[in-house]
Image (cartoon, coloured by chain):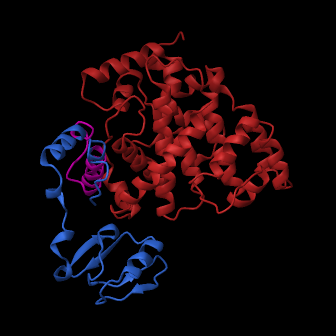
Amino acid sequence: MSTSPKTLRPKDLITGSTRTSSLPEIFVMINEVVNDPTSSFSDIAQVVNLDTALSARLLKIVNSSFYSFPSNIETVTHAIAVIGTEQLHNLALATTIIANFKGIPDKTLNMNLFWRHSMGVAIIARNLAIHCRESNPERFYLAGILHDIGRLIILENLPDEAAEIMARKNEASQVLWKIEREVLGFDHGEVGAALSRSWNLPLSLEEIIGNHHNPSLSKRYPLETTIIHLADIIAKAMGLGSSGDIHVPPLDETSWEQLKLPTGVFSAIWNQTETQFNETVNIILSS
Amino acid sequence: MRKVRIEQLTSGMRLAQDVINFSGQVLLYKGNPLQPKDIKNFKAWGIIEVVVETSSLNSSNSLDSNRIDAKLLAEAQNEISSLFQYSNISHPVISELMRLSTLNKLKQKPGMENVNVY
């Protein structure tokens, strides 16, 4: 890239890369069929089934301890009927994205650990959302999968700067996203938000991803952002994977109070997450 | 009065406050001694903690850190301390996560697999 990093904007990283400049094709197709009011469950299932790896994974997730349905769900049509169109849509995007980012060199960042961290945050956020009685908990799963995606985009497009950031992190005792701001002028949250915008994902996702380290900056979706912020903290405390920085990030105490959750939920969420995490990691990260 | 986590409840403890579910329905009125079926019922409703009379607590229900080897506990606490170096450790969220994280580390130590302290 010819421009110096200091004048780069997060948007430039997105448009400069073929991996991120457009949504995976299968997802565009799913989007279209889901947004078409005349589509039936079987129309949607037909599109999902075009990608056999995707549909096989979705069925495994729907049959896992995530849902604990009493009987086996064998077809995508049945899965949509029991979990809902919007929910399946979110699960499908989460699954597609991980596949889309395969093949990033993992010298600087261990990709398996990176996705384990993202999945940990996704599962914890989903469980927190259920405890907060939020609708459609799968949108939190998707937000968790995407929350650190900016880090991968920085790594792929600015490998030198990414290496410098990691080197500085080892010297200074400072959280990674603050070092990113020193070196690049922006952090991975802003890059992820730019990706979400260019893919035309819901505005809530853009705000959640962009502010997950500073939930009090979220004006429209403060609760959603705080759930991801907290899930990130819990995932680090549980030691699930690593996004390049194993330290528990500082908690935004004011935002936490808005959630109105008792701290007693953490042990329940911890136990729930352990079971679901081991199961889901096997489904999603095995290729 | 003391808040007691659902996992720590034992039958015979007496409620100091009504236990209500999320829709406001009373599951058990205060003053009642707990029976095993009540605890099961609370779990089914997803109750996390209840308030009981301090006088009805017996000593075996206090945090049982003396049953755990002090050396192993110190080791586990030491292992997690760097993890939380950027956190405000006096905040209730962080202290609860540190407690769970310590227990988790403790479980990974030989002979401690079945430790079950809440």
Magenta includes B101?
A: yes
| Front-most of residues B34 and A243 | B34
In the displayed structure, would residue A85 be above or below residue A115? below
Please report the residue visible at 35 percent of the width from the left and 64 percent of the height from the top: A262
| Residue A137 as seen in the image, left or right of residue A81 | left
| Front-most of residues A107 and A197 | A107
Which quarter of the image is occupied by the C terminus of chain A? Answer: top right
- Write down the quadrant of residue A58 in the picture: top right
Percent across and percent down for residue A201 are 64, 42
Percent across and percent down for residue A189 are 47, 35
Which quarter of the image is occupied by the N terminus of chain A? Answer: top right
- Magenta part mainly helix, strand or loop? helix
In the figure, what tint was chain B given?
blue
Please report the residue visible at 30 percent of the width from the left and 80 percent of the height from the top: B11
Chain assigned red? A
Magenta includes B26?
A: no
| Front-most of residues A244 and A284 | A284
Percent across and percent down for residue A25 are 75, 32
| Residue A63 as seen in the image, left or right of residue A145 | right
Percent across and percent down for residue A166 are 36, 21
- Write down the quadrant of residue A107 in the picture: top left
Instruction: Kindly tell me whether residue A220 is visible in this rendering.
Output: no
Please report the residue visible at 86 percent of the width from the left and 55 percent of the height from the top: A38
In the displayed structure, would residue A122 be above or below residue A4? below
Please report the residue visible at 19 percent of the width from the left and 52 percent of the height from the top: B90
In the displayed structure, would residue A5 be above or below residue A57? above
Point out the stretch of residues depicted in magenta: B81-105
| Residue A55 as seen in the image, left or right of residue A149 | right
In the displayed structure, would residue B64 be above or below residue A124? below
Residue lying furthest top in this view? A2
| Residue B36 as seen in the image, left or right of residue A224 | left
Instruction: Kindly tell me whether residue B33 is visible in this rendering.
Output: yes
